[in-house]
């Protein structure tokens, strides 16, 4: 038996075996419950007794829908990791944690779909009346009430864990009810009022800014932020969001996500953080904001579902970024007919890693000109499945990349394509190898 009076760090693997959090664990500094099965909200009710706790991880615990108010007693807490949980709202008492520096959050989504999209996808075979929001809410409410008042149906004992009515009520109240009524996307957490008091916060990820007028004002007051990831940007709040970025002068990493799209939403950034080193954008941009071309400190850039229409102009802008080392162009980052991606002479002087993954259905060629990407070491390519590229000239210029070490591919390609790529790699004096991811 571990002496919990003296233990200062506890990491649990596998399935949760409930134990009572007591004063005997008062010296605990680290509690890591990542990916624990059968961990539910009521197991955390006494978490506030761990007065010396500095690190708490619930990452991957899909049975956690809310954090208890007793979390506010953890005055020494510095890191809270709730990624890949079902938590949508942080408790109001979290504003008492004045030493908190890192909040990692990102709720699991069903493809970031809205209620209407789910209804059309999952209920399209049902009668139209059951696709109505009010009818669905009534049906779901009745189902949960039946389960809650019939404990013999739900008190299922499995590996010393009881799935009881508390768990079902939490699922309904904290997850299903808000999703159906407000038609929320299943992505991001909502911050409580007064969050600005956490002045030491350096990392804040997975925040939904679409609900609550004061959320961006709270974030603007967190001037020590180094890393920020937000979702829910739209036409209504984009102006204030752009203004917020101007005040976060210490920001080094920024992630923005919007399911409806980002077209025109980021154009109002007049004074981007000068020290920004990492930028990830997910959402329909159509056109690259001009300020991105002035990010001279940028090291990492990822574009996803941006649907950029000006391929050549975008690549020319990005190619002039002096410190860009990692470029990831992911699913539908570009749109157009018969796109030809060309890396010109002296472009991307610091690029080391280039990932091209399903960037467009219409991508026809990728060309590397002489003296382009001189430091490129890793090139990764994934085409749209099941479209197997049979074009032997899909890639060109691979033999002229002086620093190339690896060319990574998935498995959906014809022999002619693979042979052509291998011949180019064989002609490269640096001896790069082809690998399958």
Image (cartoon, rainbow, N blue to C red):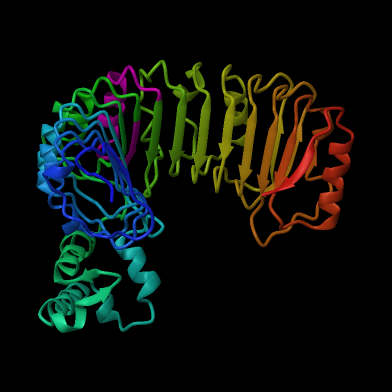
Q: In which quadrant of the rendered view does residue 181 lie?
A: bottom left
Q: Is residue 159 above or below residue 355?
A: below
Asked whether residue 232 is in view, the answer is no
Residue 295 % position (x, y): 48, 19
Nearest the eye: 189 or 274: 189
Q: Which residues are magenta?
A: 228-252
The residue positioned 82% from the left and 50% from the top of the image is 418
Q: Is residue 136 above or below residue 203?
A: below
Q: Is residue 430 above or below residue 10?
A: above
Q: Is residue 145 above or below residue 381?
A: below
For residue 115: magenta? no
Residue 303 % position (x, y): 51, 38
Nearest the eye: 429 or 388: 429
For residue 246: magenta? yes
Asked whether residue 179 is in view, the answer is yes
The residue positioned 19% from the left and 77% from the top of the image is 155
The residue positioned 32% from the left and 17% from the top of the image is 249
Residue 160 % position (x, y): 25, 69
Left or right of residue 283: residue 95: left
Residue 35 % position (x, y): 37, 53
Nearest the eye: 398 or 70: 70
The residue positioned 39% from the left and 30% from the top of the image is 254
The number of callouts visible is 0
Q: In which quadrant of the rendered view does residue 310 lie?
A: top right
Left or right of residue 210: residue 397: right
């Amino acid at each position: 038996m571990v002496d919990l009076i003296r233990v200062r760090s506890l990491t649990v693997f596998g399935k949760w075996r409930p134990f009572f959090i007591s004063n005997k664990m008062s010296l605990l500094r680290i509690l890591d419950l990542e990916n624990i099965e059968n961990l539910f909200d009521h197991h955390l009710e006494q978490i506030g007794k761990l007065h010396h706790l500095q690190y708490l991880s619930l990452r991957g615990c899909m049975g956690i829908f809310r954090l208890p108010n007793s979390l506010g007693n953890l005055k020494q807490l510095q890191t809270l990791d709730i990624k890949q949980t079902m938590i949508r709202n942080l408790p109001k008492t979290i504003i008492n944690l004045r030493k908190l520096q890192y909040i990692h959050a990102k709720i699991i989504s069903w493809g970031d779909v809205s209620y209407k999209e789910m209804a059309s996808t999952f209920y399209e075979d049902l009668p139209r009346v059951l696709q109505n929001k009010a009818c669905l809410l009534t049906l779901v409410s009745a189902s949960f009430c039946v389960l809650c008042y019939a404990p013999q149906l739900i008190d299922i004992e499995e590996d010393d864990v009881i799935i009881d009515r508390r768990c079902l009520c939490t699922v309904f109240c904290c997850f299903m009810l808000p999703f159906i009524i407000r038609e929320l996307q299943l992505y991001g957490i909502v911050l409580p009022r007064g969050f600005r008091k956490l002045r030491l916060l350096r990392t804040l990820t997975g925040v939904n800014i679409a609900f609550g007028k004061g959320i961006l004002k709270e974030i603007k007051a967190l001037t020590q932020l180094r890393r920020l990831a937000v979702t829910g940007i739209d036409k209504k709040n984009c102006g204030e969001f752009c203004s917020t970025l101007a005040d976060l002068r210490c920001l080094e990493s920024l992630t923005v996500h919007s399911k409806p799209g980002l077209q025109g939403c980021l154009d109002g950034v007049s004074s981007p953080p000068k020290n920004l080193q990492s930028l990830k954008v997910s959402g329909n941009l159509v056109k690259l904001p001009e300020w991105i071309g002035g990010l001279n400190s940028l090291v990492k850039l990822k574009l996803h579902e941006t649907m950029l229409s000006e391929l050549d102009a975008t690549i020319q802008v990005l190619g002039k970024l002096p410190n860009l080392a990692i470029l990831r162009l992911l699913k539908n980052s570009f749109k157009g007919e018969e796109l030809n991606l060309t890396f010109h002479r002296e472009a991307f002087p610091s690029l080391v890693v280039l990932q091209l993954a399903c960037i467009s259905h219409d991508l026809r060629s990728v060309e590397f000109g002489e003296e382009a990407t001189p430091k490129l070491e890793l090139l990764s390519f994934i085409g749209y499945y099941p479209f197997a590229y049979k074009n032997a000239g899909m890639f060109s210029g691979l033999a002229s990349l002086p620093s190339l070490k690896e060319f990574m591919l998935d498995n959906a390609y014809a022999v002619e394509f693979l042979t052509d790529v291998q011949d180019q790699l064989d002609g490269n004096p640096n001896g790069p190898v082809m690998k399958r991811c």
